[in-house]
Image (cartoon, grey):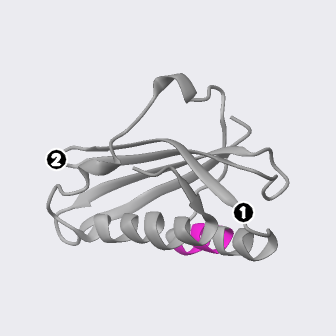
Amino acid sequence: MIRTKSAHQFITFYMGTFRDFFKNTSNIMYHFNYYDEGVKGIGCYMEKEMDYTRLRSYFERYATTHRDPEIKVIAALMIRGGAHMTAEFHVTTKQKWLGFKDHFHIVVRVVNDETVGWGVRHLNMAFDC
């Protein structure tokens, strides 16, 4: 998988895929399962929970305020069990973003509700990891 994406590509591809994946009942997204323990940060400060719309607004704001930003996904992991799923991205950019250093994490945790299917319950970001 190509790991360097523009901010626009990151929004449309990764976040759109997340949203579709959460609605899907089949296990089809194994191509996201690449990961390197060596780049995982420790002691990350987790920002408060935010929903999909808010997270997307962050990326849209970033895309409009930075000239040709590159967002490199240096590691990604999706784990899906019968009732829970975690999607974790370790991301770096060329420039500071929202006043933080260029390395941040996105952690998405979802649960499978029998009445509505998969849905996001926790979506956090961690900076300076």
Mark sitting earlier along the chain (2/1) = 1
Find residue 46 and report its horizontal and vertical position in percent. 64, 43
- Magenta stretch, main secondary structure, is helix
Secondary structure beneath label 1 = loop
Q: How many discs mark residues in the rendered view?
A: 2
State yes or no: discs 2 and 1 in contact (Cβ < 8 Å).
no
* Residue at 50% in and 46% down: 89
Find residue 30 and report its horizontal and vertical position in percent. 25, 49
How many residues crowd around disc 2 within 10 Å: few (fewer than 14), some, or many (20 or more)?
few
Front-lying residue, 80 or 94:
94
Front-lying residue, 61 or 22:
61
* Residue at 75% in and 51% down: 94
Viewer-side label of 2, 1: 1
* Magenta-span inclusion, residue 40: no
Residue 69 badge: 1
How many residues crowd around disc 1 within 10 Å: few (fewer than 14), some, or many (20 or more)?
some
- Name the kind of residue labelled 1 in the image: Pro
* Residue at 72% in and 63% down: 69
Q: Which residue is mark 2?
A: 82
Find residue 128 and report its horizontal and vertical position in percent. 74, 38
Find residue 14 and report its horizontal and vertical position in percent. 45, 63
Locate residue 110: give its quadrant: bottom left
Front-lying residue, 66 or 23:
66
Q: Quadrant of the C terminus?
A: top right
Secondary structure beneath label 2 = loop
79 on left or right of 94: left
Q: Specify the segment rendered in magenta.
A: 53-58
